[in-house]
Image (cartoon, rainbow, N blue to C red):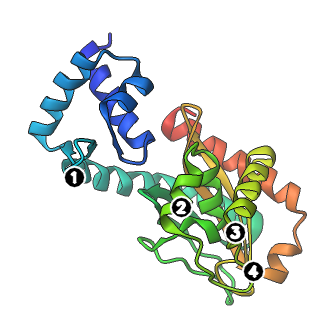
Amino acid sequence: MSVQSVERALDVLEALAGQGGAAGLSEIAARTGLPYGTIHRLLQTLLARGYVRQETDRRYALGGALLRIGGAAERMVAAWAEPYLAKMVELSGETANMAVLEGDFVVYVAQVPSPRRLRMFAEVGRRVLPHSTAVGKVLLADRPDAGAVLGRTGLPRRTDRTIVETDELLAEIGRVRERGYALDLGEEESGVHCLAVPVYSGGRVLAAMSVSGPAERIDAHDREELAASLRAVADDFGVSVFGG
């Protein structure tokens, strides 16, 4: 049996997360369908506990108290992800990673390295901008405000293959939505290619899983077959851990 006040408080927190971590009352109301008075009362309780904070422009933002919960949850999810990432290594022969979007940055939260001598590493905990990575494109593809995110971060050039025009990248993100996977063809690091797929929770993309390696080895795979195999693993992970 659900507790209505708890459900509504979680709706408010999820609305803030869905707005990139900060929103005004009208934006929260639009996302949750809750009355302004109810939202205000819930926010006052969450403010008192540190789960939200109020900005100088009177908008509300996710608060520091969530870090205590989020840090522990992130470590647990990373541990749960490892056998699935290991399966991706078996399928591809390459290093597998899992990443999430925190604010406007991609953060790598788990990794299983390739057994090969020449292999790629993305240090767990590393933060990168989303535009030049396959995991970043997958995560942006689920964001209705992807253009606003890119407006805040910019599209700095990482290599001569990096997409640095917003319209071009938004078109690429549209293709990611259609085909169900994203590519980084030397856009973050020269000579390194990556293929990433989404991890779903409740119909939303919670994380991205990827394999990366030297361009010639990644390109030796049939791209569609590899993507389908990785999606099956990511879907199993999403259902097992998050209920799909």
Residue 199 in picture, x, y percent from top left: 60, 46
Q: Position of residue 172 (x, y in %)?
A: 76, 58
Question: Label 4 belongs to which residue?
Answer: 161
C-alpha gap between disc 2 and disc 4: 20 Å
Image quadrant in which the N terminus is located: top left
Q: CA distance from mark 1 to mark 2?
A: 30 Å
Q: Earlier in the sequence, mark 1 or mark 4?
A: 1
Q: Residues within 10 Å of mark 2 (few under 14, many from 20)?
A: few
Residue beneath label 1, please? 68
Q: Say which residue appears at 59% left-offset and 61% top-offset.
A: 136
Nearer to me, 91 or 188: 188
**Disc 2 and disc 3: Cα gap in Å?**
11 Å
Q: Which residue is mark 2?
A: 151
Q: On the picture, is 231 further left or further right than 66?
A: right
Crowd band around label 1 with a 10 angstrom C-alpha radius: few (<14), some (14–19), many (20+): few
Residue pointed to by mark 3? 165
Q: Secondary structure at mark 3?
A: loop
Question: The residue under label 2 is which amino acid type?
Answer: Gly
**Three-letter amino acid code at the position of disc 3:** Glu
What is the total number of numbered labels drawn onto the structure image?
4
- Residue type at mark 4: give it: Arg
Q: Nearer the viewer, mark 1 or mark 3?
A: 3
Residue 116 as seen in the image, left or right of residue 112: right
Q: Is residue 28 visible?
A: yes
